[in-house]
């Protein structure tokens, strides 16, 4: 059973953003979308979503910087951030975790794996409160 948890997708590629948005909507999540890092930080601060999917390679403000800013704000620091990247480089993963990302997935995104990851964040959040 899924209540209306809100997930923010920060992704500049419209095809990826639409695919993820459609998939999460079909799972009954409320979906917010941002097209670059600047908008991603703005929407995160304004709406305080329950989880953020963060592309790392973004225009205007990259995903690492956006994540750092979100994690530095008291009101949004608790939000799990899952980094999405096309790069399978080990250094990329380390940089994402250093920036404060809680998790990391390499594109193309495995939808089933992503669904399980999201559910694990929501179930651990529910049981800890
Ligand atoms: Mn991108």
Image (cartoon, helix red, strand yellow):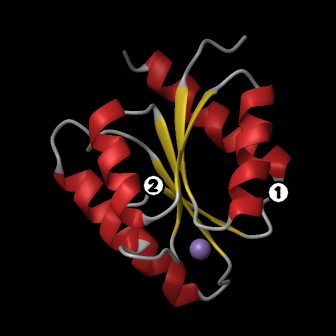
Residue in view at x 72 percent, y 35 percent: 24
Residue 16, horizontal then vertical, whole percent = 74, 60
Residue in view at x 36 percent, y 73 percent: 61
Gap in angstroms between the C-alphas marked 2 and 1: 18 Å
Q: Mark 1 = which residue? A: 110
Relative to 118, residue 87 above or below: below
Quarter in which the N terminus is drawn: top right
Residue 60, horizontal then vertical, whole percent = 38, 75
Task: Ligand 1: give its quadrant.
Answer: bottom right
Residue in view at x 46 percent, y 64 percent: 36
| Occupied quadrant, residue 119 | top right
* Closer to us: 29 or 35: 35
Q: Mark 2 = which residue? A: 102
Mark 1 residue crowding within 10 angstroms, few (<14) / some (14–19) / many (20+): few
Q: How many marks?
A: 2
Going from N to C along the chain, the mark reached first, 2 or 1, is 2
CB of mark 2 near ligand 1 (< 8 Å): no
Residue in view at x 34 percent, y 33 percent: 48
CB of mark 1 near ligand 1 (< 8 Å): no
Front position among marks 2 and 1: 1
Q: Secondary structure at mark 1?
A: loop
Mark 2 residue crowding within 10 angstroms, few (<14) / some (14–19) / many (20+): some
Relative to 56, residue 102 above or below: above
Residue 95, horizontal then vertical, whole percent = 41, 79
- 54 relative to 46 in the view: left or right: right
Quarter in which the C terminus is drawn: top left
Dots 2 and 1: beta carbons under 8 Å? no
- 40 relative to 57 in the view: left or right: left
């Amino acid at each position: 059973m899924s209540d209306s948890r809100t997930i923010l997708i920060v992704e500049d590629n419209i095809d990826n953003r639409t695919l993820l948005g459609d998939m999460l909507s079909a799972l009954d999540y409320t979906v917010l979308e941002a097209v670059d890092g600047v908008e991603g930080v703005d929407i995160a601060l304004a709406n305080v979503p329950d989880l953020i999917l963060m592309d790392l390679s973004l225009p205007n403000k990259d995903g690492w910087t956006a994540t750092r800013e979100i994690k530095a704000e008291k009101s949004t620091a608790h939000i799990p951030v899952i980094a999405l990247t096309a790069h399978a480089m080990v250094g990329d993963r380390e940089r994402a975790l250093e920036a404060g990302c809680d998790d990391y997935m390499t594109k193309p995104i495995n939808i089933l794996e992503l669904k399980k990851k999201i559910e694990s964040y929501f179930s651990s959040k529910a049981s800890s409160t």
